Amino acid sequence: MSKWLVERKLSEAADRLRHLRAELNVVEEQLASLSDAADDARLRAMVSETPMADREHRDAQKHADAMSRHRAELIAEIAELQRSQDELLERLFAEQP
């Protein structure tokens, strides 16, 4: 692979990493909020013992769980992109005289 192509791929990877890290920060804030809401709904369901409160808890927990899965996917994508970036850097330095 030519040097300019490796450099271009590195630049693209760096841009993508910045984007993913920014998205991860937003997702973590949303996850904290959704988890708090799910915890509050759980407590209300325990206290009120009504089907409606229980359903609200399940719904809130589903949202928190979905955001948690999204967070895990982002973390895995970031890790994979970092591995790819490391390989590109190794390739770039291996080509230098």
Image (tube, rainbow, N blue to C red):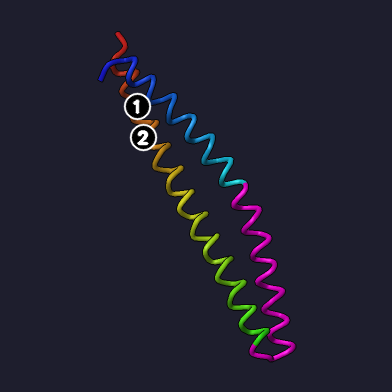
Determine the residue positioned at 64% across, 89% down: 51
Between the C-alphas of marks 1 and 2, the distance is: 6 Å
Determine the residue positioned at 53% across, 37% down: 19
Dominant SS of magenta comes to helix
Mark 2 residue element: helix
**Location of residue 90 in the rendering, given as x and y in whole percent from the top left corner:** 34, 25
Determine the residue positioned at 52% across, 54% down: 71
**Location of residue 91 in the rendering, given as x and y in whole percent from the top left corner:** 30, 23
- Amino acid type at circle 2 is Ser
In this rendered view, identify the residue nearer to me: 62 or 94: 62
Image quarter in which the N terminus is found: top left
Q: Left of 31 or right of it: where is 6?
A: left
| Disc 1 residue crowd, few under 14, some 14–19, many 20+, Cα 10 Å | many
| Disc 2 residue crowd, few under 14, some 14–19, many 20+, Cα 10 Å | some
Magenta stretch contains residue 28: yes
Q: Quadrant of residue 62 in the image?
A: bottom right
Residues shaded magenta = 26-51
Residue farthest top in this picture: 97
Residue on which disc 2 sits: 84
Q: Compared to 13, does 54 lie above or below?
A: below
In this rendered view, identify the residue nearer to me: 94 or 33: 33
**Location of residue 37 in the rendering, given as x and y in whole percent from the top left corner:** 69, 68
- Amino acid type at circle 1 is Leu
Cβ atoms at labels 1 and 2 below 8 Å apart: yes
Q: Compared to 12, does 34 lie above or below?
A: below
Q: Check residue 23 in the rendering and tell me which mark sits there, or answer none.
A: none
**Location of residue 7 in the rendering, given as x and y in whole percent from the top left corner:** 38, 19
Q: Left of 10 or right of it: where is 26?
A: right
Residue on which disc 1 sits: 88
